[in-house]
Image: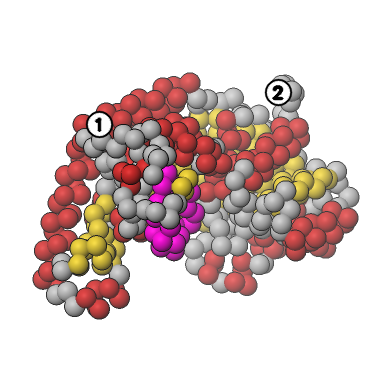
Amino acid sequence: MTAMFADRADSGRRLAEKLRYLAGEDTVVLGLPRGGVPVAFEVAAALEAPLDVLVVRKLGVPYQPELAMGAVGEGGVLVFSEEVVRISGVSQGEITALVRSKRAEVDRLAVFFRDGREPASLTGRTVVLVDDGIATGATARAACQVARAKGATRVVVGVPVAAPSSLADIAEVADEVACLEAPRSFFAVGQFYRDFSQTTDEEVVSLLRQAAEREARAGQVADPLIRNEEVEVPAGTARLIGNFRVPAPCSGLVVFAHGSGSSRHSPRNRSVAAVLNTAGLGTLLVDLLTSDEEVDRSQVFDIELLAARLEHATGWVEAQPESKGKPVGYFGASTGAAAALWAAAQPASGVAAIVSRGGRPDLAGPRLAEVRAPTLLIVGGNDDVVLELNRQTQAHLRCPSELAVVPGATHLFEEPGALREVTRLALRWFLRHLEAPGSPAER
């Protein structure tokens, strides 16, 4: 069979094209050492994302090493398949000895590869796990479990080539799988590369160092954030947790109202917020319910309560020294869109613009006619039910409004390029309507 890739760098550049739809999201690229790191290096460069390694060792059943009963990851992460452990009959003593051995190996390699740098935080982020190919898939499955245990919100596995049967297994533990080639005739990963020479430990260290230097250079020219922190927002007797980011200069603020089942850690909303920050808009991603409240489904759909909390968050933003006097907009998703419209309908509301992403604005029904802020409704073209609800909602709005349909997108805008289009539409809307006095007009 003719080799599909010249070398790992070639496969990485080609894989990066397939993963470009992740650009702009809060993403970290993790290479599985050793061979996955040269591939991941190219992906991280294309996505302008940080690069790190994920050192993980599967725990194979002693008499059948390819059968994984669990995995050991960095930071003491330990995951097990209770079913495999039970069926295999491995004793506790054997498990303890194996874990101790693998954990020592993981810790040693993690320190060596990073050469003094801290590991990238995975909490609340989209993690792209990259290897040079997948044969059995056992290590990749274990890596997915470890990444999720370390706080990843979304796990995407990216590989140039894989055995078809393994792809199905990976899809069970990953949120998405991006693979360039899945040939039926698959014997070993190396058969698909002209140059499949071994990646050395020193090469891994060098590539990680280059990526860190590249990220540092990018950070030096990026617009500075004068405030970037987790904050506590008082809302009556409740205390709401949010992430507050203010760039310099700042021409306006956008408060994000998340939908049911989401939070300030939403990778989609964080991705949109990052682009708004780059464009000079501050953002507050705030959880409108406390951790105890969000398990109560009646409160999740209590639009009046959510709107009242959003009003408290707006008042908090308007009182901050960095954002005082700046125009404020709302970005609502799902039920959060209804809360944004309900809050904006209050007579004293000064909100200047609203964007709804895959929202349920119909849930603000009795208040829709009172909304005065210009409103943009963004819906996926394949999200049929929600699209119809948004069309009906627009008919009840008396404020300036537009309905933007993203072709081929479903409710969560997970299709390639869909979230990027949402971000572009939202940014244009906010720049048009959040122009502070003396700020430059949108070009």
* Residue 412, position as x, y percentages in the image: 62, 55
In the rendered structure, the answer to whether residue 414 lies left or right of residue 431 reads left
Q: Nearer the viewer, residue 279 or 98?
A: 98
Q: Which residues are magenta?
A: 157-178
Residue at 13% over, 56% down:
101
Q: CA distance from mark 1 to mark 2?
A: 48 Å
Q: Nearer the viewer, residue 192 or 276?
A: 192
Q: Quadrant of the N terminus?
A: top left
- Read off the residue under disc 2: 439
Residue type pointed to by label 2: Ser
Residue 183's place in the image compared with 216, above or below, is: below
Residue at 25% over, 31% down:
203
Select label 1 or label 2 by which is in front: 1
Residue 287 visible in the shown view? yes
In the rendered structure, the answer to whether residue 265 lies left or right of residue 1 reads right
* Residue 371, position as x, y percentages in the image: 82, 50
Mark 1 Cα shell of 10 Å, populated few (<14), some (14-19), many (≥20):
some
Residue 203 numbered mark, or none: 1
Which structural element holds mark 2? loop
